[in-house]
Image (spheres, rainbow, N blue to C red):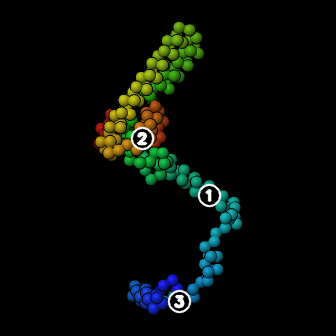
């Protein structure tokens, strides 16, 4: 049917049977071929397990183990178990690039806290206005520092990798605004260390 030659089909089948016999000298099934019904039954798994409480416990344990691996990876920088947002060689380089510098963004939260404390204990209008001017000057300085850091990072990424993945510079900028000890994944380089 459909232009097949019966003899050619039989010849191909004989050749494949001979090649399997040559490959395995112990050729021989030793058991009857399972019926289609038996094969389908063997492949079936219930959508809802019979023992739901055991399945729930197993699921909770698997989730807990995955969370522990992710947490350990955030501490050690192990690429295999990092969350998707932190994976990749460019993001690793961006993290290291941010972590070797002293960024102005790290100190914004401290200055904001100092301003809140000053306005609570010294509600003098002139002092409050001066502290807010200082705060806004600090914000402008952080923005300028972030722009220059982003440009330098982009140049280094192009020199090292040939291209810049989307979102890497923004990822580094957001990391530079965090206090160093609270950054995740934790810094793997020291301040001032030379990057290759």
In the image, residue 125 sits, relative to residue 179, either above or below, namely: above
In the image: residue 193, left or right of residue 74 = left
Q: Please name the residue that numbered disc 1 is placed on.
A: 59
Packing grade of label 2 (10 A; few <14, some 14-19, many >=20) is many
Whether pointer 3 and pointer 2 mark residues with C-beta atoms closer than 8 Å, the reply is no
The residue nearer to you, when weighing 166 against 127, is: 166
Q: Of helix, strand and loop, which one carries label 3?
A: loop
Find residue 17 and report its horizontal and vertical position in percent.
44, 88
Q: Which residue is mark 3?
A: 30
Which mark is in front, 1 or 3? Answer: 3
- In three-dimensional space, the C-alpha distance between marks 1 and 3, rounded to whole angstroms, equals 39 Å
Give above or below for 130 relative to 190: above
**From this viewpoint, which residue is outermost toward the bottom?**
7
Is residue 51 visible to the viewer in this orientation of the structure? Answer: yes
Across and down, in percent, residue 26 comes to 44, 88
Tell me if label 1 and label 2 are in contact, CB under 8 Å.
Answer: no
Mark 1 vs 2, N-terminal side: 1
Which picture quadrant has residue 60? Answer: bottom right
């Amino acid at each position: 049917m459909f232009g097949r030659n019966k003899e050619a089909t039989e010849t191909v089948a004989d050749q494949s049977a001979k090649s399997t016999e040559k490959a395995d000298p112990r050729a021989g099934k030793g058991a009857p071929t399972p019926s289609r019904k038996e094969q389908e039954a063997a492949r079936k798994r219930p959508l809802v397990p019979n023992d739901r409480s055991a399945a729930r416990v197993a699921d909770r344990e698997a989730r807990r183990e995955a969370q522990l691996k992710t947490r350990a990876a955030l501490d050690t920088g192990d690429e295999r178990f990092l969350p998707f947002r932190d994976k990749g060689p460019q993001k690793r380089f961006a993290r290291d690039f941010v972590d070797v510098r002293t960024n102005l963004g790290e100190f914004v939260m401290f200055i904001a806290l100092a301003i809140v404390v000053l306005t609570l204990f010294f509600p003098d209008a002139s002092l409050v206005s001066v502290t807010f001017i200082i705060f806004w000057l600090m914000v402008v300085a952080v923005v300028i520092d972030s722009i220059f850091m982003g440009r330098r990072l982009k140049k280094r990424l192009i020199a090292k990798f040939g291209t810049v993945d989307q979102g890497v510079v923004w990822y580094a900028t957001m990391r530079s605004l965090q206090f160093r000890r609270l950054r995740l994944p934790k810094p793997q380089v020291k301040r001032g260390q030379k990057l290759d």
